[in-house]
Amino acid sequence: MNVGPVIVFGAGGHGKAVISVLRASGYSVSGVFDDDPSKQGEKCLGFSVYGFDNELLARPGLTGVVAVGDNAARREVASRFDHIAWLTLVYPDAYVNPTAQLGAGTVVFPGALVGAEAEVGAHVVISGAVGHEAVLGDFAQLGPGVQVGGGAQVGVGVMLGIGSVVVPNAHIGDWAVVGAGAAVVSDLPADCKAFGVPARPVGE
């Protein structure tokens, strides 16, 4: 697919990481946009940062990526600019099995792995490993070193902290947060925060 310059939404640390993936993947960046006034007028990896009210964003035919680390905020930006064609981005050294499915706007970072017949939703952030036939809901995020076992189901907006593990076939409810280094060995409910080995919910 031929894609022209890409608009990046987000000028924070996650934005810099996404711009690096774009560059390594051979894409050019047409502009960086952020709704934080303190970032507007500054530079992000050499690119000027503009606000969300910029008239460029109203033009048709734009391609973009939401480079916002917070899952709920990423959903808000994607919904606000739903006329934009969201780019699915895979770093060159990441591995995505040909039978896996990646949703629009998903970003697969360096060293990540997506196994056979995995189903990944839209605007997902993957910095770890996704096992065969696992399912990741829209706006989920896997931090560095995360391991999701085969057949596991990770709900919409779930945050899996650095180095956490999800055993095969476990289910995690929507918008749950799993702490760094935790081991999910049984199902977790939606909207919970879970920590430890094994991971246990500690509240909403």
Image (tube, rainbow, N blue to C red):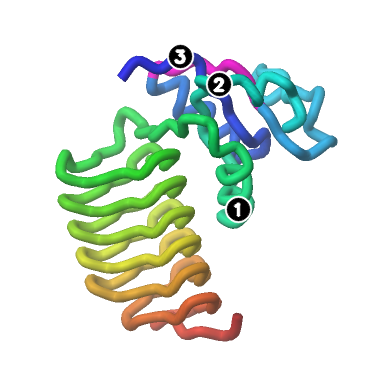
User: Dot 2, crowdedness within 10 Å: few (<14), some or many (≥20)?
Assistant: few
User: How much space separates mark 3 and mark 1, taking CA atoms?
Assistant: 27 Å
Q: Residue 144, how many percent across, how many down? A: 43, 51
**Residue 171 falls left or right of residue 71:** left
Q: Is residue 20 left or right of residue 113?
A: right
Where 86 falls versus 135 (above or below)?
above
Q: Nearer the viewer, mark 2 or mark 1?
A: 2
Q: Position of residue 113 (x, y in %)?
A: 27, 46
Measure the C-alpha gap from mark 3 to mark 2.
13 Å
Q: Which residues are magenta?
A: 26-32
**Residue at label 3?**
4
Q: Can you tell which quarter of the image residue 83 is in?
A: top right
Residue named by callout 1: 70
Q: Which mark is residue 60?
A: 2
**Residue drawn 73% across and 24% down?**
49
**Residue 54 in the figure: left or right of residue 72:** right
Q: Give the tally of numbered discs.
A: 3
Q: Is residue 203 visible?
A: yes
Question: Residue at the spot x=43%, y=49% of the render?
Answer: 124
Q: Name the kind of residue labelled 1 in the image.
A: Asp
Please name which of the two marks, 3 or 1, marks the residue nearer to the observer.
Answer: 3
Mark 3 or 2, closer to the camera: 2
Residue found at x 40% / y 17%: 3
